[in-house]
Image: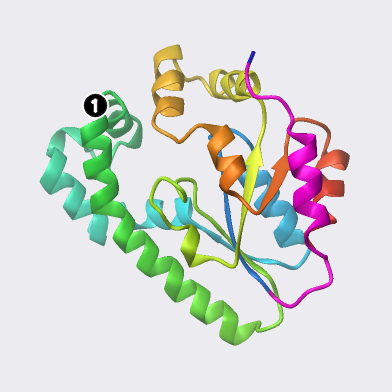
Amino acid sequence: MGLQAPWRAIALCFLMRSSEQARRYFGLTGGIACGKTTVAACLSARGWGRIDCDRIAHELLRPGAENWQKVVDEFGEKVLTATGEIDRRSLAKVVFARPELLQKLNSITHPAIRRCWLREKEQFERQFPERNLAVEVPLLFELGLEGEFDEVICVACSSSTQRKRLLARGWESWEVEARLASQFPLEEKIARSDRVIWNEGTMVCLERQLDFLS
């Protein structure tokens, strides 16, 4: 049947915390294709700071960058394009077919990603000491990073919607299932988060939920 909107849990998350509070440092996570990027963009438009770990990951995989060399050393030149860039789709097909390789890739790449986001966080806090900051970390719970933040926001939707969105991106069915299986169940992420954003309706509905955050 799939995950349904946990309205009681969402309401409790909002009611337990006043929107009138000092600057906070949020971890923004959730399931794949649940809309973390959309939520982050909305928060940024409201004046929040935003750090995107996917952006950092891409930058660190550029030819000659720190994680580029580590990935090539581990997985070989077969994951490179003709121009020397890492073919992210090919790499994903390799690691999501074998969980131990995915774990190895994460252990190679995530320490450097964390160092970069912490540097950006320090710079942001010096420049904007009164503004909230959200860091998008897709694998926040999988990597045990919840202790890094004042609060964790989980963006969620039903599993059927996740699958529809991923298939619409041109993914094959096996890729969708492998990617979903590689992450903690969304129910667990919701239960472990301080706040939940249910992203399956209109933008008006989404924005209304965000009103409780800012």
Q: Which residues are magenta?
A: 2-23
Point out the image quarter for the N terminus.
top right
Q: In the rendered structure, does residue 129 fall within the stretch colored magenta?
A: no
- Number of marks in the image? 1
**In front here: 7 or 55?**
7
Tell whether 39 sits left or right of 26: right
- Label 1: how many residues lie within 10 Å, few (<14), some (14-19) or many (20+)? few
Query: In the rendered view, would you say 2 is above or below 47?
Result: above
Instruction: Tell me what residue is drawn at x 66 percent, y 53 percent.
Output: 40
Query: In the rendered view, would you say 199 is above or below 11?
Result: above
Instruction: Tell me what residue is drawn at x 54 percent, y 65 percent.
Output: 149
Q: Which type of secondary structure does the marked residue at label 1 adopt?
A: loop
Where does the image place residue 2, in percent across and percent down from the top left?
62, 18
Where does the image place residue 63, in percent across and percent down from the top left?
25, 53
Instruction: Tell me what residue is drawn at x 33 percent, y 55 percent.
Output: 110
Residue occupied by mark 1: 98
Q: Amino acid at mark 1?
A: Arg
**In front here: 142 or 94?**
142
Point out the image quarter for the C terminus.
bottom right
One can see residue 85 in this view: no
Tell whether 114 sits left or right of 121: left
One can see residue 159 in this view: yes
